[in-house]
Amino acid sequence: MTARELDAAGITEPATREAYTRCRALNARHGKTYFLATRLLTPDRRPFVHALYGFARWADDIVDVDHGPGGGAPAARQRDLADLETALLDGLRRGRADHPVVTALADTVRRHRLDHALFTDFMAAMRMDLTVTGYPTYADLAGYMHGSAAVIGLQVLPVLGTVTSREEAAPAAAALGVAFQLTNFLRDVGEDLDRGRVYIPGDILTAHGADRALLTWCRGRGTTDPRVRGALRETAALTRGVYRRAAVGIPMLAPVSRPCVRTALVLYRGILDEIEAADYPVLHRRVAVPRHRRAGEAARGLVGVVSSRVTHRARSRPVPCGATSDTPEESTV
């Protein structure tokens, strides 16, 4: 975390500054798309987004890292996740914690008055990943994604700020979290299968004559069966629909936050483009947006940042006596 960002956010206590810095490092190392988009936020907002994503990344690593073939939930992984949840609940109650990532999270929750249920729901979803290996229907998967993805969008929303009520913007924010995760599920089908999990809903697989056994066969052969390709194509189309529901929320955000979210949406949706263009090879390789495309979208986002900040500063100037302003009030909490 840069001193400029911490100073802009009003984070002064040394241990808390170090905690936020650790969260930023986690995101820089693991989430290239998210981290790139976050650079388009105003400096005062960046530390809080890093805290929220840093905590999510920490929990996700406990669930996934070094997970051997065939899945399962080793006792050490269960213990580590339980320890993290204990630290979380204690940190939310006291507003501080011994765990550095939880320290930054608890500070963010306090400053932005975030609902604690958003974090307990998230931890419930993480526990599911230790035991649940598949989802019979999309409705079942949506129940999981509420805690693993939708709540992330709802956590970040108050940090971004809105020009509408938070309640009006919430459905689109939740949809964006779900769209990102569905995209990850498509991109990581092969890797997830190695962990013993299938996130493509069973009813979609069945509708195309596919199942877990066929996915495993394709993974072993380094190929994609037409039946699997059909299921992946339907899942991609479903995901695009979720992106459309998410996109309507961008104009509801504070103007200075829109370039960040728009860039993240375009880049992550671009993963779908790459998957489709490559004819769904996700069982045997990881598809990514090319570096030049990421750079191009970041550049366009930067232009949007400059424009929005200039406009915001102009509208924030004092209104002369007797004049009126029709600029909507920006909510930042």
Image (cartoon, helix red, strand yellow):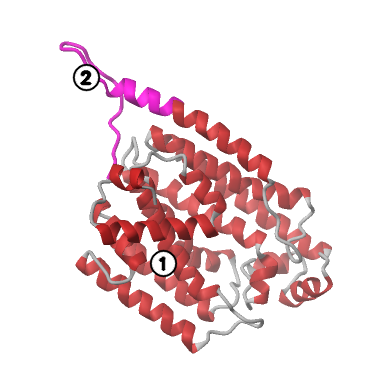
Rendered position, 297 above or below 109? above
Q: Residues within 10 Å of mark 1 (few under 14, many from 20)?
A: many
Q: Residue furthest top?
A: 322
Rendered position, 40 above or below 218? above
Residue type at tag 2: Pro
On the image, the x and y values in percent for residue 254 come to 37, 36
Q: Is residue 85 visible?
A: yes
Q: Is residue 151 visible?
A: no
Q: Residues within 10 Å of mark 2 (few under 14, many from 20)?
A: few
Rendered position, 321 above or below 309? above
Q: Residue at x 45, y 62 (%)?
A: 146
Q: Is residue 186 left or right of residue 208?
A: left
**Quadrant in the picture for residue 231:** bottom right
Residue type at tag 1: Phe
Q: Which residue bears the numbered disc 1?
A: 122
**Quadrant in the picture for residue 297:** top right
Secondary element at image label 1: helix
Q: Which residues are magenta?
A: 307-333
Q: Which one is in front in this view, the residue at disc 1 or the one at disc 2?
A: 2
In this view of the protein, which residue sits in the foreground, 69 or 277? 69
Q: Is residue 32 left or right of residue 290?
A: left
